[in-house]
Image (cartoon, rainbow, N blue to C red):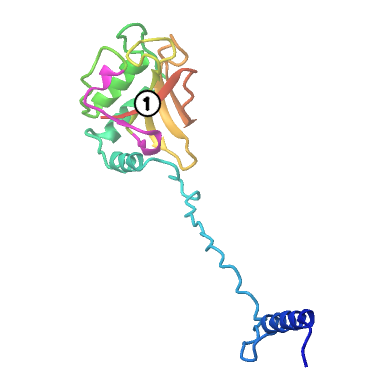
Amino acid sequence: MRVPAKAFVIGLITSVTFAFGAAPSFAAEPVEDFAPAPAAIQPATLISQTLDTTNSALAGEPIDSVLDMETLSTVPHNFDVKATIAQAESEVGTSRPTGWNQPGECIMSAQRWIKAGGGAWTGSGNPVANYDGATRMTLATAEPGDIVQYEYTDSPTSWVSGIHTVLITEVHDDGTFTIIESNNPGGSGLVNKDEKWTPKPPAGFDAVVWRF
């Protein structure tokens, strides 16, 4: 039987389409992975650690300053401190003339007391040169026999109103000192003793400690 040409063509097209559209019997079925995705790895957190030293009395001080203080505390007096203090004590309540190089002046009295103990106070001239041969201390390292000099900050070598000199005779646990001084009030030439003294330099002055 003869098949019409049109029917033959339609049948051929249908068979070819089916062959290409159908999945082959040997094709593997797709596999879907239901396992949870791995969590993203987070970068490690850096933990910062610090050492708290704020309870130290020396916190914030440069190390060279600390070493300097330790060194200063071992500097000895090169004279008889007891003899110096005894001379100063013997003058309390007395007065002397005042004026340039006069014995009632504060620094001249301090010189006299140091020399009474055999101290080599040989400097002179200005408030700094007077302490040639002495060691500059700190209030924290001050001891009996040391001199406190009020010094003009802007010009330490100048003699200006406000300069004063005292002798430390005792150091107290509360931070105060016993001192002996002369010419206070100014012009009196009077020697006084203050058993609860703390430095109170005028504005623009420093309290400088010297040890012979």
Task: Specify the farthest residue to the front.
Answer: 2
Q: Residue at x 59, y 68 (%)?
A: 40
How many circles with numbers are drawn on the protein? 1
The one of 172 and 83 positioned closer to us in this rendering: 172
In which quadrant will I find the C terminus?
top left
The one of 83 and 144 positioned closer to us in this rendering: 144
Q: Is residue 141 magenta?
A: yes
Q: Quadrant of residue 63?
A: top left
- Residue 154's place in the image compared with 116, above or below, is above
Question: Is residue 35 toward the left or the right of residue 5 in the image?
Answer: left
Q: Position of residue 200 (x, y in %)?
A: 49, 24
Q: Position of residue 169 (x, y in %)?
A: 37, 33
- Residue 170's place in the image compared with 4, above or below, is above
The one of 156 and 202 positioned closer to us in this rendering: 156
Question: Is residue 60 toward the left or the right of residue 145 in the image?
Answer: right
To which residue does mark 1 refer?
208
Q: Position of residue 130 (x, y in %)?
A: 27, 18
Q: Position of residue 194 (x, y in %)?
A: 47, 28
- Residue 145's place in the image compared with 11, above or below, is above
In which quadrant will I find the N terminus?
bottom right
Q: Residue at x 37, y 17 (%)?
A: 106
Q: Residue at x 25, y 35 (%)?
A: 77
Residue range highlighted in magenta: 128-144
